[in-house]
Image: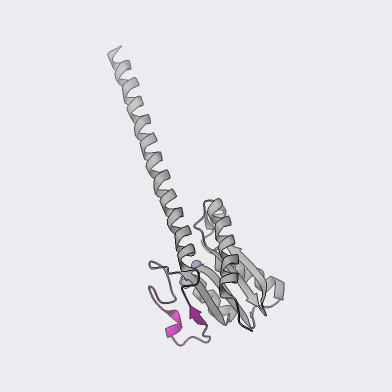
Amino acid sequence: MEVNHEYFMQEALKLAELAYNQKEVPVGAVIVRDGEIVGCGYNTRKQNQNAVLHAETVAIYNACKKLGSWRLWNCDMYVTLEPCPMCTGAIINSRICNVYYGAKNIRAGACGSVINLFDYPFNHKADIKGGILEEQCAALMTAFFENVRTERKKLKEEQKALNTSDNTSQNLAEEA
Ligand SMILES: [Zn+2]
């Protein structure tokens, strides 16, 4: 049976959108076995102030729980962004077979961008395929970081305005 990679990436994208709406870096992941989603996750690092809560680790956690096994036998992962070294490590440790990702992660990707951990002789090798719905996945990231920049700029301007008014009132006080 031909697997519909775009369908599952679309599901991962929906999770990434949940992260986006919660002002988290928008990454979503699903784990699939025999055409069925057995684990979902999205990045909740900021709201939980926990560095390990990436989309992939959350999805692996949920899939292990559902399947009652640390070994995710015959499972594939769909993730909107190329996994980082931590998540690639978790993919190796959970024995996921195939990883399909959307956008490249040029600054932290460990499946080819910064490094390809699968080029090294670890005890498990997953097959990697990038570029699934790449444009949509990348567009969500771009929109997120543009918002962050706009909000930062707004905050700076507000602080600047506040400082100016502080100075004005200070000046008036000094003058009085
Ligand atoms: Zn990660």
Q: Is residue 75 left or right of residue 83?
A: right
Where's residue 46, x and y in %? 52, 54
Where's residue 168, x and y in %? 32, 22
Front residue of this view, candidates 103 and 22: 103
Q: Quadrant of residue 106?
A: bottom left
Give the position of the N terminus as an image quadrant: bottom right
The answer to whether 150 is drawn above or below residue 66 in the figure is above
**Magenta residues, start to end:** 112-132
**Residue 129 lies in the magenta stretch:** yes
Q: Is residue 44 visible?
A: no
Where's residue 67, x and y in %? 71, 75
**Residue 63 lies in the magenta stretch:** no
Front residue of this view, candidates 29 and 140: 140
Where's residue 117, x and y in %? 44, 80
Q: Quadrant of residue 169?
A: top left
Q: Residue furthest top?
A: 176
